[in-house]
Amino acid sequence: MSTPDPGVYISTAQMYQEVRDLAQTVGRIESKVDGFIDEAKDIRSDVQDHELRIRTLERARWPMPTIGVLAGLAGAATGAVALFAR
């Protein structure tokens, strides 16, 4: 008959220390996650600010093509008048 395997014995003090170490590790991870969340909020506000600035620039740009078209039409009209005025 063989003797039973005694297995591994973990004392309550060792178990308590492991739980404390795990709690500290979870606390560190939680603080890092909170930091990432704060950075994400900052990035989100920066993106919204950039979006607002881009929209403002796009609204300010619309007269440029119109002015170009009007200048082209004015030049064409001037050329036509000069051609038919002879």
Image: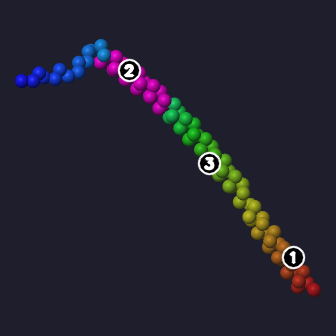
Question: In percent of the image, x 38 and y 20: which residue is there?
Answer: 21
Examine the image and state in which quarter residue 5 appears. Answer: top left
Q: Earlier in the sequence, mark 2 or mark 1?
A: 2
Q: Which residue is mark 3?
A: 51
Above or below, comparing residue 75 to residue 39 in the picture: below
Query: Which numbered disc, 3 or 2, marks the residue that appears first in the sequence?
Result: 2
SS for tag 2?
Answer: helix
**Whether residue 28 is situated above or below residue 51 in the rendered picture:** above
Residue 61 vertical position relative to residue 22 in the rendered view, above or below: below
Percent position of residue 28, x then y: 45, 25
Image quadrant holding the N terminus, namely top left
Color style of the picture: rainbow
Examine the structure image and report whether residue 23 is included in the region drawn in magenta: yes
- Residue 68, given in percent of the width and then of the height, sits at 78, 66
Q: Nearer the viewer, mark 3 or mark 2?
A: 2
Q: Amino acid at mark 1?
A: Thr
For image coordinates 17% across by 20% down, the residue present is 6
Is-magenta flag for residue 85?
no
Q: Residue at x 48, y 29 (%)?
A: 32
Q: Name the side, left or right, on which 4 lies relative to 35.
A: left
Q: Which mark is residue 78?
A: 1
Which residues are the magenta region?
15-34
- Residue under the point 61% across and 41% down: 46
Point out the frontmost of discs 1 and 3: 3
Between residue 37 and residue 84, name the one nearer to us.
Answer: 37
Q: Amino acid at mark 3?
A: Glu
Residue 71 percent location from the top left of the image: 81, 69
Dominant SS in magenta: helix
Residue that numbered label 2 is attached to: 21
On the rendered structure, is 85 left or right of 38?
Answer: right
In the foreground, 67 or 45: 45
